Image (cartoon, rainbow, N blue to C red):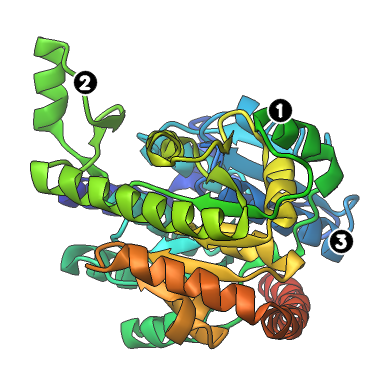
Amino acid sequence: MDRFLSFLIRIIVLFSGLAQHLAKLGIGSYEAWEPGEKLKLLIVGYNGARNTGADARVVAITEQLRELFGPENVQITVMTLDRESLAGYFPEDVVLQEFSSIFLLDLYRACSSHHAAVLSEGSTLKSTFANGLTLFLCEAAGIMSKQKKPCIAYGSEIGEMEDFLKKTAVDLCRDCYFITRTEDSQKALEQLGLRGHCGTDTAWTYQPGVSAAEIEPALVEAGWDGSAELLGAAVIDPFCWPVRASLFRWLKGFFTGDRSGRYDKWYYFSDSPARREAFRQYIAAFAAALDRFAEERNCFPVVIGMERLDEKACKALQAALHRRSALFLSGNTDAARMTAVLGKLSYLVTSRYHASVLSMVSGIPITAVSMDERLDNLMREMSFDRLYLHHVSDADLSEEIYASLCSGAAHRAEIRAQIDLLREGYLQKLSGMGAFLKDYLSERL
């Protein structure tokens, strides 16, 4: 089904070059920038799904674009799966444009009516989560190329892809410029023969606007005594990916009413008895390590769901813990409050990339339990991989997490100094990325 989706996208991209002529006949719309006009910028990403990292990224990108061009000179549109989920994140002049998870024509119309596009999704070219997500971004890049409009991927991760997807990405993203967020992603980009240079993640400049003190009442209500160190855990279900389009499963659900395992419409999570057992062991390893460390140091556990889809994993972890704990879920905790929670922690064990990034403003020890190259790349870049990087299927995961927590407690001052130094470098990179983006779009318009 993903291959068929790729075929349809290629057809749409091929005919998108006719949008200007069709608009003259009253069919659809088409816009190309003219001197003196506001620049219409389209931000394309996985927005509106209550993913804290994606929301923080797009807010930070939007703020930077408004600062670079001036709000009087640019009209920014953010594509979103759900307008309500992003309510309150942006100034009133930022347009929120909804799209369906069956995005083919929604994206065509959006690209045709804007002058330039910024791909804001961090997981840009990879098969880990969903080929459909990468195809979504490839369609945007392909349409902008066909219509001779600039497109830039901003703070991107490039990872492993299935062969058909790799070919699609190379063909449709040939005119897109990529600013990758790690050196490893830059190497992967170069292997594809695509253009770009290395920058960093865009969420480093995200300012939550909520103080750590403002979330203390919720912690106290959950059982925190106000003085114990806070031990954070951001868990996921690493074994339900990738999500794949399946017409067979959709038809089966239509006739039987069984919609278990469905993400949305014709997209379904991966599932098997082996995957469910691997998930159980992953949660058990987290719980054992957290209980042991919390007991020894009198820590209060805080379970963090960075995306709405993490709720099942978070509740499973909370149920497995022997100690009382707090639970913060992105479904009812926006990016600002979630970032404030992360900033209040004393330690963090995370399988979420942006839990790591957004907590680093506090310089706390981080233990990463990775399912793909994103956390691997980040931890290696910061030279934390030897002591603080593990993987979801490690046989001794509980012992590894516990050992990393103990090491973090013993070397907290050195870790903070290292993170502060690295963060300053990342902020400088982001400033350079902004200057490059402005020049890139200006030259091509």
Whole-percent x, y for residue 34 in the image: 75, 57
Foreground of the two, 324 or 151: 324
Report which residue position mark 3 lands on.
Answer: 67
Residue on which disc 1 sits: 221
Question: Which residue appears at 31% of the width and 49% of the height?
Answer: 284
Q: CA distance from mark 3 to mark 2?
A: 45 Å
Whole-percent x and y of residue 363? 72, 71
From the viewer's perspective, is residue 267 above or below residue 145?
above
**Where on the picture, by quarter, is residue 221?**
top right
Which circle's residue, 1 or 3, is located before the other in the chain? 3
Circles 1 and 3, Cβ within 8 Å, touching? The answer is no
- What amino acid type should be assigned to the residue bearing mark 2? Arg
Residue carrying label 2: 259
Q: Is residue 391 visible?
A: no
**Residue in the image at 57% along x and 47% along y:** 301
In the image, what residue type sits under mark 1?
Glu
Quadrant housing the N terminus: top left
In this orientation, which residue lies closer to the viewer: 210 or 407? 407
